[in-house]
Image (cartoon, rainbow, N blue to C red):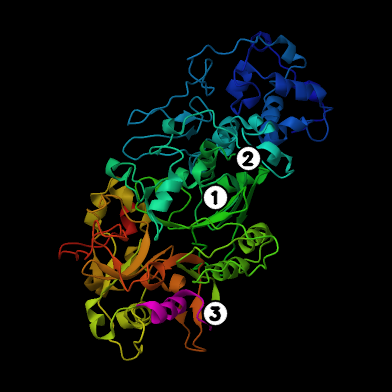
Amino acid sequence: MNRSNKRMSRMDGPELKRVRKECSYGVACYRLNPAHLREYSHPHLEAILDEWDGNGSFPIPEQMSLQRSLLTDQLNILLEKKLYEPGAADNAERAPAAAGEPLRAGGGAAGEPLRAGGGAAVEPLRAGGGAAGEPLRAGGGAAGEALRAGDSTQRSDSNDSEKNTLKSDKAIAGTSREKSESPAPGLGARIRDPEYRPVVPPTRRAEAYLPVVRPRGLMRAKHEAAAPHHVFYTAISAAPRTHAQPYSVTFLELLDESLGELRSSLQLNFMVEPGWLLAQYYFAGYSAKKLTILYGEECDDMRQLAGKPHVDAVRVRMATPFGKHHTKLMLLCYEDGSLRVVVSTANLYHDDWDNRTQGLWLSPRCAPLPAAAPAHAGEARTRFKRDLLRYLAHYRLPQLAHYVERVQRCDFSAVNVFLVASVPGSHRDLEWGLARVGALLRQHCAVPPAAGRAWPLVAQASSLGSYGPDPKLWLCGEFLQQFSASAGTPPPLAPPPPLQLLYPSLQNVQRSHDGLLGGGCLPYARAAHDKQRWLLDYLYQWRAEATGRSRAMPHIKSYVRARDSRAAFYLLTSANVSKAAWGARTKRDNALRLLSYEAGVLLLPRVTINEDFFSLEEGAAQRLVIPYDLPPTKYSPDMTPWLSDALC
């Protein structure tokens, strides 16, 4: 559009010349719908256009600088739709909406009411209004739909709806950004920090839009009560029993104020739904805080984040199409210099935090080191700090420099788990993938060599790989050998334990909270299964009666050797049972070839609780909670594994 002559964008017609009410949101208005901008006056926008000379960027006042991206979008819509009339700010009827009047989303002539509430009757919050608007959804119903940024595959071809869809994530993340002009209460002298971005309290209640919201200010106490394991599982929207469990958690709780005031955060993940993610930060009051995202799966919505000054989103490019940036890891950096690490199995996507079983580990608070301390100080017994720095360094991205420095300046001595990660490439050391697992188990796993066969390996995953025509080629060969290692057991002499692959059957998925759609997170295809029918001998059902998650399909990935309510180790990770994730030895040079980025935490009882085994028994001191029932239940003869082709 040629913006050289702004006066050409004058409003015309008797309807548009009428006196308009001033938008009750004032400077906080986040609407991107032309119908709303036509219906209501926005003096702050019109004043900016009155000062604009028609060339270059808009003269946005300094006190509105945090809203620059949103304001620019609104100003462009005013010009493109010819909704700007010079001097219109002086003609606005300053009559804010009466108390109790529903908030308008701009639908039709009178605006679409912004409705809230749970249950199946919840009305979607619309970012576009009218028939062309793409809903930005929230709330209850059987599927528990969370806030959406809009599915790019469902866009209308019209210019209006495309604009609304492309910018709909701003409808949540941009609300009340002008509040960041003044410091949050109690900040005191800290506001003098030129890089400080204050908390922006949300103007809406999270309970109206998110299916599960736990009381605020309690996450620190919940985390302390989860010691020494600090393992949690996602609350299931459709299973109220799970909401108040001490080991259940929502994403919003990870941003709870009791854990500290966030300064910046790093999100490493595969799939990201930006509207949903930014809504979580908005409801936590962190809509203006620095956010860095490294992601693997490209989508149109991710490219929209380029215009947000506080968000830095980078797609991680892979060398081969078989490799994925599959890691799910967070660094939460606080204003006091401390940080926490979250290692998770969930994508940053509303479905993954709704009715799917996910696991995560939330680290203890890693306090800042004294200014004079060397960078290698504050190491954990497990060398977690060193391994995390090695993992981050592998990306070779300047966007991570800030977070690498934060990790270097923090004390990780309270961390009692091992980081087990994979990075693409050929490796001859014992630092990554399967080699890392075997090396740690040979040092710390207490399964007696003579009783090894009585301790089966449960490998639980949301996807199965291609293993070849014979189980001994990899699955019951290299993979099982490394995962069954233990202290004092020479690998060639130790008979492998039974392998139990825990993966949902078709019948499990049919009975899930979301029906067949519950299998959307289980991408095992018929083409792969038909080549390895022998896999049926190793398959076990998804059952989680003890924790109330039998109908919440697992996107979690975990590995455990357990017997008689005891566990020899527990590994929670993003890595499925596949060669791409764990690696396979090459015949040429015996190097471990890895294709994907993965990250997990290995809990070993000798390190975590100074015992040989974890107790899994209900009511036991320092009990380790496993989300599924043990021992697992084998497939019945009439069962088949879930195959993703059922959704085609």
Q: Residue at x 71, y 24 (%)?
A: 45
Residue type highlighted by circle 1: Cys
Between disc 2 and disc 1, the foreground one is: 2
Q: Which residue is mark 1?
A: 299
Q: Which residues are magenta?
A: 426-445
The structure residue drawn at horizontal position 24% and vertical position 86%, both measured from the top left corner, is 450
Going by the numbered disc 2, the residue's amino acid type is: Ala
Residue 443 on the magenta segment: yes
Residues at marks 2 and 1 touching, judged by CB atoms closer than 8 Å: no
SS at mark 2 in the image: loop
- Going from N to C along the chain, the mark reached first, 3 or 1, is 1
**10 Å neighbourhood of mark 3: few (<14), some, or many (≥20)?**
some
Is mark 2 in CB contact (under 8 Å) with mark 3?
no
SS category of the residue bearing label 3: strand
Q: Between label 2 and label 3, give the one nearer the viewer.
A: 2
Question: How crowded is the residue under tag 1: few (<14 C-alpha within 10 Å), some, or many (20+)?
Answer: some
Quick check: 296 left or right of 197? left
Say left or right for 56 vs 310: right
Residue wearing tag 3 = 426
Residue 421, position in %: x, y?
Answer: 49, 69
Residue 376 in view here: yes
Instruction: Please give the residue where the numbered disc 2 appears in the rendered image.
Output: 288
Q: Is residue 468 visible?
A: no
Between residues 238 and 232, which one lies in front from this camera angle?
A: 232
- Left or right of residue 525: residue 26: right
Q: Give the residue drawn at x 70%, y 28%.
A: 75
